[in-house]
Image: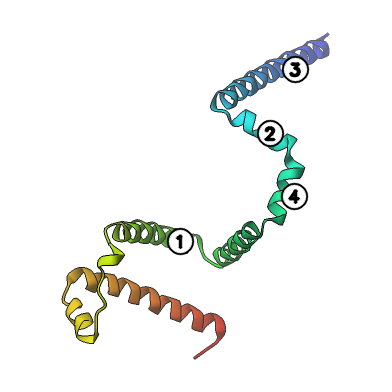
Amino acid sequence: MAVVKKEEAAAALLDEEASKALESLVETAIALKRSGILDMLRVIAEKSDELLALIGNDVPTQRALGLAHAAQSGLAKLTPGEVLGAKNTVELMTACSLKAMASTKPEEVKPKGLFGMLGALRDKDVQVGLAFLLAIAKGLGACIRSQTGKA
């Protein structure tokens, strides 16, 4: 009799867990349906062969995947701290570069000679920008030398 009660209790517990899991699954499906993601996933599943063929034959996509693979291979050589540092620097560079490009009108930029460039070095912003680029160049050179064995 005691064994039967244990089995009944275990079955009731499993039924309760299964019921909660099913409820969670239904809630997730409803949320995916409302957001449109479920319909998109259905189309992807139905057209997967066509999509894979399209992606596989698209030269720009192949090139992008090649670059993504190369970037991933480079990331694999970094420590988590280095990846975080690079992420933060890329975010800063992207935001500042795009802001600088947005405020620059290429048609208004005039060529500068040697003395014009020397004069531009008096500008604090130019000094900071060049110092940043020189710091990157130094780190890039040190890394290249260490990985290629160049003295």
Q: CA distance from mark 2 to mark 1?
A: 40 Å
Q: Residue at x 30, y 65 (%)?
A: 106
Label pair 2/1, CB-CB below 8 angstroms: no
Q: Earlier in the sequence, mark 4 or mark 2?
A: 2
Q: Earlier in the sequence, mark 4 or mark 1?
A: 4
Q: CA distance from mark 4 to mark 1?
A: 38 Å
Q: Which residue is mark 3?
A: 10
Q: Which residue is mark 4?
A: 53
Outermost residue toward the front?
107
Percent position (x, y) of residue 96?
A: 32, 59
Q: Which mark is residue 43?
A: 2
Q: Earlier in the sequence, mark 3 or mark 1?
A: 3
Q: Nearer the viewer, mark 4 or mark 1?
A: 4
Q: Which residue is mark 1?
A: 81
Label 1 SS: helix
Q: Earlier in the sequence, mark 3 or mark 2?
A: 3
Q: Earlier in the sequence, mark 4 or mark 3?
A: 3
Q: Which amino acid does the dot numbered 1 rest on? A: Gly
Label 3 SS: helix
